[in-house]
Amino acid sequence: MVLVFAKNEKIYSRAAVVSSKKIGNAVVRNRVKRKVRASLDPIWHRIIPSWDLILYTRPGITLATFEEINQAIDHLLKQAEILGEEKLC
């Protein structure tokens, strides 16, 4: 998976998931995009506001487990320094 990010002028962050035809047919591509979006949901509150994120999926993601996708996204966001600290309420 590849992460492309840029600062935006909004007070919130946005994310998009892109899957090319190299991933598979429409059913497979949509399933992969749903998995990636579902992986973003639990950590979305930790993403620093005012960022646009694009996650490009790669063909190997079809074999990845949900936990591996979670770890990959977490690693990419930490590496980009977009992920803030866990808030305890």
Image (cartoon, rainbow, N blue to C red):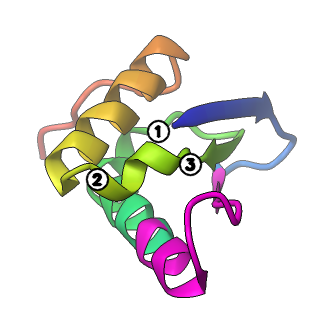
* N-term mark: 2 or 1: 1
The three-letter amino acid code for the residue at tag 2 is Leu
Residue identifier under label 3: 57
Label 1 to label 3: alpha-carbon separation: 20 Å
> Where is residue 88 shown, x and y percent of the image?
12, 39
Percent position of residue 1, x then y: 51, 37
Q: Residue 32: image x %, image y %?
A: 44, 67
N-terminal of the two: label 3 or label 2? 3
Mark 1 lies on residue: 47
Tag 3–tag 2 contact (CB < 8 Å): no
Up-down: is 83 above or below 39?
above
Image point 71% across, 48% down: which residue?
A: 11
Residue at the spot 50% in from the left edge and 68% down from the top edge: 33
Circle 2 residue: 63
Report helix, strand or loop for mark 2. helix
Image point 60% across, 84% down: which residue? 26
**Residue type pointed to by label 3:** Thr
Q: Does the magenta stretch include residue 24?
A: yes
> Dot 3 lies on which element?
loop
Q: Which residue is drawn at 42% across and 44% down?
A: 60
- The residue carrying pointer 3 sits among few (fewer than 14), some (14 to 19) or many (20 or more) residues within 10 Å by Cα, namely many
- Seen in the picture, residue 85 relative to 34 is either above or below; the reply is above
Q: In the shown orientation, is residue 42 left or right of residue 22?
A: left
Residues shaded magenta: 14-32
- Compared across the picture, whether 24 is left or right of 14 comes to left
Task: Kindly identify the amino acid type of the residue bearing the numbered disc 1.
Answer: Ile
